[in-house]
Image (cartoon, rainbow, N blue to C red):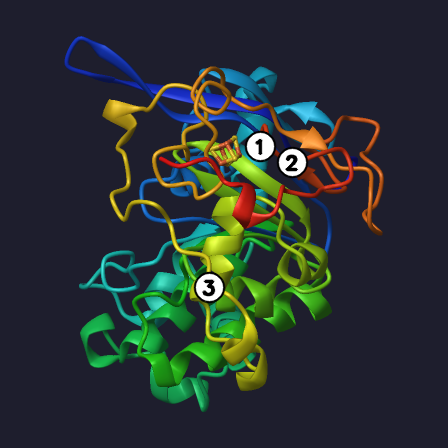
Amino acid sequence: LREGLELEGISRSFRVGSREVWAVQDVSLEVGRGETFCLVGESGCGKTTTGRIAAGLIRPTRGTVRFRGDDVWRLSREDFATFRRSVQIIHQNPYASLNPLHSVEHILAIPLQRHHPGLSRREARQRAAELLTMVGLTPPGEFLPKLPHQLSGGQRQRVSIARSMTVEPSVVVADEPVSMVDVSLRAGILKVLERLRDEAGVGFVFITHDLAVARYFGRGGSIGVMYLGRMVEQGPTEEVVARPIHPYTRILLDAVAEPDPARTRTRRRIEPRSMDVPSLLRMPPGCPFHPRCPWYEPGLCDASVPPLRAISGRGSRSASREGPAASGRAVACHRVDESGELPPMAAVAPS
Ligand code: SF4
């Protein structure tokens, strides 16, 4: 992927006491210019760790991160610094990510002058004002002298977005960018990010626990659903949302408000067998979703971890040359057949 970012077979472990705990296992994704890859899942599923690996903040234990075709962990110091500038991260907490003692002008001018060493103070101020206009903080002259505590949560997140744009990144990892912003301000922030993607060609790794947000922001792109550190389903957003295959994705989508009330009345809701989410410290054997899965089959589902494999049927794009996880439709479930079908719910084995 010459212009973009690619994660191939990424795993990352951490030491917890004397144990090695795998936060992310064998995750692959790619994002090019103006594209979106949405990573969704519950908290603790490994999506933030994956995002930090994508941004070069954490080194993977296994697997390769490529930027413009190069393995970033084999780059020279100088080229690695360029990669780090080219892939920016927007954190979920706009309160913690801005220096409380710096004015908005200062927050934007520092990276601007670092990125363009010849820039005068006046020029940096002018560029900062343009960035504020771009993220909808107008008139910019009103916002430049303000300190972070004088801004609302939504305004702070817009300043964070403007700051990430000071270095003209190719890719932005947006880690729950609207989850800590007031509900009434979320649509505005998403619109700003959309403009950066569609007009400036920025690629997005968009991390969210909220499938409704992923469905909106990820349309036209790809989506990956993570559960306990693994990708369980991956594919074009519209296809996954219209026809989820993996039991976990089906349950997640069932929890999102159904726009058509007639369908809600007639459709059978899929409930998990258990509401307890196992932790990474107590990983169940076999399929990590088996303690909660309504399709669980004893002796099959708890015997081995299902690999992420390409699904050939029903209008899905074929797996890419890099393998099923890189594009096309792929699912990690022992009971899904070649064409992407699960057996009927009635055939589910008792737990
Ligand atoms: Fe459910 Fe078994 Fe598929 Fe896991 S492998 S998602 S337990 S049916």
Question: Is the C-beta separation of discs 2 and 1 under 8 Å?
Answer: yes
**Numbered label attached to residue 187:** none
Horizontal relation, residue 167 to residue 221: left or right? left
What residue would you read off at disc 1?
Answer: 333
User: Which is nearer the N-term, disc 3 or disc 2?
Assistant: 3
- For label 1, the SS is loop
10 Å neighbourhood of mark 2: few (<14), some, or many (≥20)?
some
10 Å neighbourhood of mark 1: few (<14), some, or many (≥20)?
many
Is the C terminus in the top left, top right, bottom left or bottom right quadrant?
top left
Q: Is residue 350 above or below residue 187?
A: above
Q: Position of residue 120 (x, y in %)?
A: 50, 63
**Numbered label attached to residue 269:** 3
Mark 2 Cβ and ligand 1 under 8 Å apart? yes
Q: Quadrant of residue 267?
A: bottom right
Q: Is residue 245 above or below residue 180?
A: above
What residue would you read off at disc 2?
Answer: 336
Is the N terminus in the top left, top right, bottom left or bottom right quadrant?
top right
> Relative to the observer, which residue lies in front, 276 or 8?
276
